[in-house]
Image (cartoon, rainbow, N blue to C red):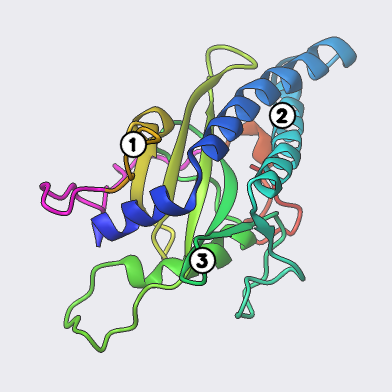
Amino acid sequence: MENEILNRLIEVLPRHLLLDLTDMGVARARQAHEIIRDHTRLQGKSARGAEGQVRFRIMEQGFEEICETYGGVLLQGGLVEGSDLRIFQPFMRFADGTGPGIVLGLASMPARRELPIKNMSRTAGVELNYRLTPRLALDEHDPKPGDIFVLFLVARDPARSGQIDEIAIGIIDAEYKNFLFYESMENFMARYAPPDKPAQVDEAAPAQPLVKLKSKRKAFKPPESGEKDENSQDETG
């Protein structure tokens, strides 16, 4: 299962898409800081909260624009396609041919390797990942995975305003408790082969554990979350 998921990520998500999204995330984090610093008189917690709101909104705009450039299709109608799962953020679907694809979303992490704030859109999205969780009594009659929900994750640097601490790619389990897969963008990009060699995870190589449990620690909500209820339709990072 691990190699199947990794191969799909590599085959469906273009390398240059991830490079452009990474550059966008870094640039717009700096832009949000400059907007609040230069065009408001906010200080302290108020400034950090406003910066977080601006940062996510302008990243969200850039995320949608870049994904469309690389063939991503915006899920329309406020629903995950083929379901009654409601979403309120831009989710972009990528597919290689007519087979299962990837639904890609954007999220801010409180810190590197920390789950992003749960909201209605992400709660709906992770339900696509139900079949990725190992279960007993799997056989050839078990349903095969369809689309999977993947997040482009951004963690701000708490010590340096306007800077990014880590950008990563992650898959959250259907119960929204742990990352099924998490890798920094730098490490993930190293999985892509040179242009003259097909990119593929070696099936014979020792499999890396797919489930990476997050150590328990006190729940933290970043200032930009605004302490909104997780079911709020006014969703941020």
Q: What residue type is labelled 2?
A: Gly
Q: What element carries label 3?
A: loop
Q: What residue type is labelled 1?
A: Ala
Q: How far apart are marks 1 and 2 (CA)?
A: 40 Å
Residue under label 3: 97
Residue for point 71% across, 29% down:
49
Residue furthest front as drawn: 196
Q: In this view, does 111 lie to the left or right of 62?
A: left
Q: What stretch is highlighted in magenta?
A: 201-220
Residue type at tag 3:
Gly
Q: Quadrant of the C terminus?
A: top right
How far across and down, in percent of the image, does residue 153 sit? 51, 39
Numbered mark located on residue 193 in the image: 1
Give the labeled residue for mark 2: 49
User: Which of disc 2 and disc 3 is earlier in sequence?
Assistant: 2
Compare residues 33 and 138 and report the one nearer the observer. Answer: 138
